Amino acid sequence: MVRTPLTPWERQRGELLGSLLREARGERSMVEVAARAGLSSETLRKIETGRAPTPAFFTVAALAATLGLSLDTLAAVCNESTDDAAVPMTA
C-alpha cells in the first residue's frame, strides 16, 4: 500500500501539534513523559519535531492524558488556520 503524500497543511498541523506537546511537557524530560504515555522517547521526539506529523489517535490521546491536555483543545488549536486556502475542504 502506497501512502499519499502529506499536504503542506497536514505538515503544518503536525508541526503545530508537536510544538503544543513540547510546550505542555515543560521541564519534564522526554523520556519521563514518553514512558508515562507508554511510548518510546524516539516516537515522542518525532512527534514534537514534526517528523511524525500524523500520529495515531491513541498515541495523541495517551500524550494528552499524560500532559493534562484536553483532546478537544488540541483538535481545535491544530485545526485552526490563518490561511483558509490551505485548509482542505471536507464533505
Image (cartoon, helix red, strand yellow):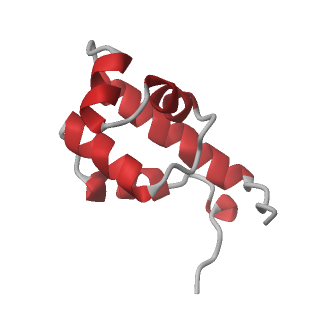
Observer-nearest of 23 and 59: 59
Residue 35 located left or right of residue 65: right
Quarter of the image with the N terminus is bottom right
Could you tell me which residue is drawn at 72 percent across and 50 percent down?
Answer: 8
Q: Report x, y in % for residue 61.
A: 31, 51
Query: Which residue is situated farthest in the left direction here?
Result: 68
Residue 74 image point, x, y percent: 35, 50
Tally of numbered discs: 0
Q: Where does residue 42 sit, x and y in percent of width and height?
A: 51, 25
Q: In this view, does 27 lie to the left or right of 15?
A: left
Taking the spot 65% from the left edge, 69% from the top edge, the residue there is 88
Please name the residue shown 48% across and 54% down the image. Answer: 56
Residue 91 drawn above or below residue 4: below
Q: Farthest residue toward the bottom?
A: 91
Q: Quadrant of residue 38?
A: top left
Of residue 21 and residue 57, the one placed in the foreground of this image is 57
Please identify the quadrant where the C terminus is shown. Answer: bottom right
Closer to the camera in the image, 21 or 33: 33
Whole-percent x, y for residue 89 in the image: 63, 76
The reply, left or right, for residue 32 in relation to residue 17 is left
In the rendered image, the vertical position of residue 83 relative to residue 16, given as above or below: below
Q: Would you identify the image quadrant in which residue 84 lies?
A: bottom right
Residue nearer the viewer, 74 or 1: 1
Asked if 22 appears above or below 70 in the picture, the reply is above
